[in-house]
Image: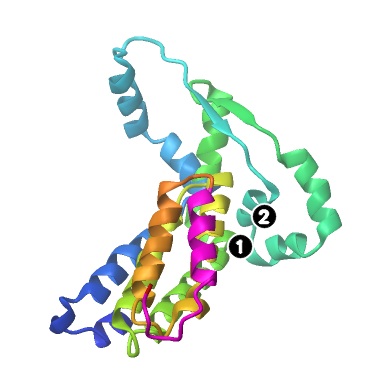
Amino acid sequence: LDRAVALDDAGHDFALSTAAAKHLANAMCYDDMIRVADLKTRSTRDRRVRREVGVKDETVLQVTEYFHPRIEEFCGTLPAGLGSYIEVRPKLAAFLDRRINRGRRIRTDSFAGFAALWFIGGLRRWRRRLLRHKVETEHLERWYALALSHVRDDYALGTEILNCRRLIKGYSDTHARAQSKFDRVLSALDMVKGREDAADWIRRLREAALKDEKGDMLDSALKTVASLSDGPGSSI
């Protein structure tokens, strides 16, 4: 966060630092199999589910959790070296994916189901050594460095790049789709940087991505950006 603060000032109402603080915190709280399993086995979740469905404490409540892990999630729970070893070997990854990539319904009111998720959630103490943490940390650093590299020339653009972190959320397929939208929005940087309205265009692209789950609005907005033929600094 100090890197953003060093580039910020009161004249901009510290918008850069505010965005950095918010989105760095969210980026470090990424969802993975370990975090999801941990959340689903906490006592607070049982109390919340009972409250939401209106079930009394003395009543037996059956809870079924749905998981659909892919090879990416499996590798993410392995030590970084082992996970990377599998991912760079397509045949091995495909072999494992055929056995892993399927939906699973786990009853957390049963001993076996709860114990399985509790064990996975317990891996959080080793989370920093696992492949997913390495991938997320490297992605965070690239995104943060990219945003700060634009601040001196275009403060607003740097801030909007930070705000694009809003796009990344969820777990498994949801996370993959969110990551794709994030990458597509930032792919427009080379087309808009240097323009007076560059920050506004990144904001528009981000909002289009957030509003439409299928991505049609984002596709349309990206086509508009690609069609820009005026020189840098002009606006549409």
The residue under label 1 is which amino acid type? Answer: Leu
Q: Is residue 105 left or right of residue 22?
A: right
> Mark 2 — residue?
75
Residue 167 position within the rendered picture, expressed as x and y whole percent measured from the top left: 43, 57
Neighbourhood count class around disc 1 (C-alpha, 10 Å): few under 14, some 14–19, many 20 upward: many
Q: Is residue 128 above or below residue 2?
A: above
Cα gap from disc 2 to disc 1, whole angstroms: 7 Å
Taking the image as shown, residue 62 lies to the left or right of residue 78, namely left
Asked if one can make out residue 27 in the rendered structure from this viewpoint, the answer is no
Q: Where's the C terminus, which quadrant?
A: bottom left
Q: Nearer the viewer, residue 217 or 58?
A: 217
Q: Is residue 35 left or right of residue 90?
A: left
Q: Picture quarter containing residue 85?
A: bottom right
Q: Residue, x 39% and y 69% (percent of image)?
A: 201
Q: Amino acid at mark 2?
A: Cys
Percent across and percent down for residue 147 are 40, 78
Please tell me how crowded label 2 is: few (under 14), some (14-19), or many (20+) other residues with Cα within 10 Å. Answer: many
Which residue in the protein does label 1 denote? 131
Residue 232, percent from left and from top:
43, 86
Q: Does residue 216 belong to the magenta stretch? A: yes
Of the pair 12 and 143, the residue shown nearer to us: 12
- What secondary structure is found at the residue carrying circle 1? helix
* Residue 31 can be seen in this image: yes
The relative height of residue 10 versus residue 35 in the rendered view (above or below) is below
Residue 69 on the magenta span: no
Q: Quadrant of residue 15?
A: bottom left
- What span is colored magenta in the figure? 215-235
Looking at the image, the residue that sits furthest to the top is: 59
Q: Are marks 2 and 1 in contact (CB under 8 Å)?
A: yes
Q: Nearer the viewer, residue 105 or 23?
A: 23
Mark toward the start of the polypeptide (2 vs 1): 2
- Most extreme residue toward the bottom is 152
